[in-house]
Structures are given as C-alpha cells and as structure tokens.
Amino acid sequence: MLSVLNVAEWLYLDWASRAPKVLPENFIHAEWIKLHDNPDFRDLVAFLREELDRVGPSELQASKDFFLRAVAFELAFFDAAYQPGE
C-alpha cells in the first residue's frame, strides 16, 4: 500500500506544485490543484515517503514490485490522457 500511495500522491504533489500560481477558472481544476498543493498534503506525502523508507526494506521485493507496477499504471494513464486527437 505504501509503495502505491507513494507513487500516486508524490506524483500529484509534484504536478500540482508545478501548476501556474494563478489557478484555473474551472472550479474542478482549481480545487484539484489546491487539494494537492498545500502544507497538509506536503506533510502527508513526506510521511508516506518516510514510512516506505522505514518499512520498505523489510519487504524489499514486494515494495519494489508494487512501486514499479504503480509507476507503469500511472504512466499508462497519463499517456492515454494526453494522446493527441483522442
């Protein structure tokens, strides 16, 4: 669970923190950015990373496998979302 959450939440924090500081007019887009770029969410991601660093080595292969699978799924999701003309 920690491996998968680290991939998803850290990715969304990274994406949201790079969004323009002037929020989009679209309420849903603006709220998504605010949800993923705030001090509490940054603390959550830091906690998830620390926990994975703490317990991951004891289950190294499982942690690595789930992490890599989550990366592959996230990449496939974004690749599908950004296909030109679709």
Image: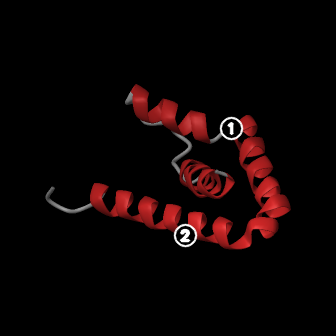
28 relative position to 19: left or right: left
User: Where 35 sits versus 69, above or below?
Assistant: above
Residue at the location (23% across, 62% down)? Answer: 83
For badge 2, the amino acid type reads Leu
The x and y percentages for residue 23 are 49, 36
Neighbour class for label 1 at 10 Å: few (<14), some, many (≥20)?
Answer: few
| Residue 57: numbered disc | none
Question: Which quadrant of the figure has residue 57?
Answer: bottom right
Residue at the location (76% across, 58% down)? Answer: 52
What kind of element bears circle 2? helix
For badge 1, the amino acid type reads Asn
Disc 2 target residue: 68
Neighbour class for label 2 at 10 Å: few (<14), some, many (≥20)?
Answer: some
Quadrant placement of the C terminus: bottom left
Of residues 65 and 37, the one nearer the viewer is 65
Of residues 52 and 46, the one nearer the viewer is 52
Disc 1 target residue: 38
